[in-house]
Image (cartoon, helix red, strand yellow):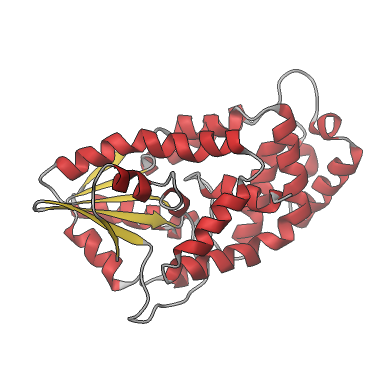
């Protein structure tokens, strides 16, 4: 079962959780993880985002920064100014209902491993007894990434959102933070518990996997990223539809509105939303647009 890849993809498709790190600068022969759509005099750039990075990742490839400078409008998955308030929503959604504790939900074996991991991160396990399994899984993964030096504040979304704000560019959001929280909150109890179990099993492998993905992203290698997407959801077609395909299709209309506008724009979404048959690149090509990787 490819659940380790599933766990990674589940994190990678959401804006609020980190996905990659490392530093590797491309040569002139390499591409970026960015595509260009042109209609008349209007250009829309589609940038596959890395939601959290190390500080030493910058500077980015010049072609990406130049595209941002050209854009008058920048669209993101969510309004990043809402993320602080969203923490309250996330905490409420991730709290167990009724009187059950996490230990009672997952059993003593899993609870003991959770406790050991939390203590290793300098946290008190008792403070997590009221959390749903998926919330604990996200928390453990986030601490693992932070410990390895990753920061959402250094991610591409934050980088370009802050840049757009500083330079007066218009910022758009393709969906709300509440919607993204709901993608996790709507996991069934069985999916939530499985998410925690497999996260615990493969937590030590997360950083090497993300390093590898980042190295492929940095030089614009689409196939390895696409393979990750396909394998990650191979046994979970309904989750694939919910977390990836449906969202891509819901974004298609606002992206087409940007293409029809007379202003150049950049669309910054998770890298996994651009690849595969149901990715934005393929969907736009199906609509007759010429989409070129840069």
From the top left corner, tell me how far across and down residue 101 is, in percent. Answer: 80, 28
From the top left corner, tell me how far across and down residue 40 is, in percent. Answer: 9, 51
Q: Residue furthest right?
A: 108
Q: Is residue 223 above or below residue 3?
A: below
Count every numbered label the image shows and give the total: 0
Q: Is residue 289 above or below residue 54?
A: above
Q: Is residue 136 visible in the rendered structure shown here?
A: yes
Q: Residue at x 28, y 72 (%)?
A: 62
**Left or right of 220, for residue 66:** left
Image-quadrant location for residue 211: bottom right
Q: Residue at x 38, y 36 (%)?
A: 249
From the viewer's side, name the closer residue of 6 and 124.
6
Q: Quadrant of the C terminus?
A: bottom left
From the viewer's side, name the closer residue of 237 and 147.
237
Image-quadrant location for residue 237: top right
From the top left corner, tell me how far across and down residue 293 is, in percent. Answer: 31, 63
Q: Residue at x 35, y 37 (%)?
A: 251
**Left or right of 102, for residue 247:** left
Q: Is residue 121 visible in the rendered structure shown here?
A: no
From the top left corner, tell me how far across and down residue 48 is, in percent. Answer: 39, 56
From the viewer's side, name the closer residue of 59 and 243.
243
**Left or right of 75, for residue 140:** right
């Amino acid at each position: 079962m490819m659940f380790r890849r599933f766990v990674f993809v589940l994190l990678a498709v959401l804006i609020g959780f980190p996905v990659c790190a490392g530093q590797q600068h491309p040569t002139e022969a390499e591409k970026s993880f960015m595509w260009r759509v042109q209609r008349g005099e209007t250009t829309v750039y589609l940038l596959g985002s890395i939601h959290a990075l190390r500080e030493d990742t910058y500077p980015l490839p010049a072609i990406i920064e130049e595209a941002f400078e050209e854009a008058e409008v920048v669209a993101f998955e969510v309004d990043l100014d809402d993320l602080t308030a969203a923490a309250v929503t996330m905490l409420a959604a991730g709290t167990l209902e009724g009187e059950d504790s996490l230990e009672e939900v997952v059993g003593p074996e899993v609870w003991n491993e959770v406790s050991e991991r939390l203590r290793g991160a300098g946290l008190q396990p008792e403070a997590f007894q009221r959390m749903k399994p998926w919330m604990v899984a996200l928390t453990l993964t986030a601490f693992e990434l932070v410990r390895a030096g990753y920061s959402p504040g250094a991610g591409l979304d934050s980088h370009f959102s802050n840049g757009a704000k500083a330079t007066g560019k218009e910022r758009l959001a393709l969906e709300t933070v509440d919607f993204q929280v709901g993608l996790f909150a709507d996991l069934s109890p069985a999916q939530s518990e499985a998410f925690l179990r497999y996260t615990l099993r493969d937590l030590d492998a997360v950083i090497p996997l993300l390093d590898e993905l980042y190295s492929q992203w940095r030089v614009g290698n689409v196939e390895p990223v696409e393979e990750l997407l396909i394998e990650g959801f191979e046994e979970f077609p309904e989750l694939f539809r919910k977390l990836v395909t449906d969202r891509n299709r819901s974004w298609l209309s606002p992206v087409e509105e940007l293409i029809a506008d007379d202003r150049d724009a950049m669309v910054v979404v998770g890298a996994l939303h651009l690849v595969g048959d149901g990715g934005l690149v393929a969907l736009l090509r199906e609509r007759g647009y010429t989409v070129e990787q840069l």
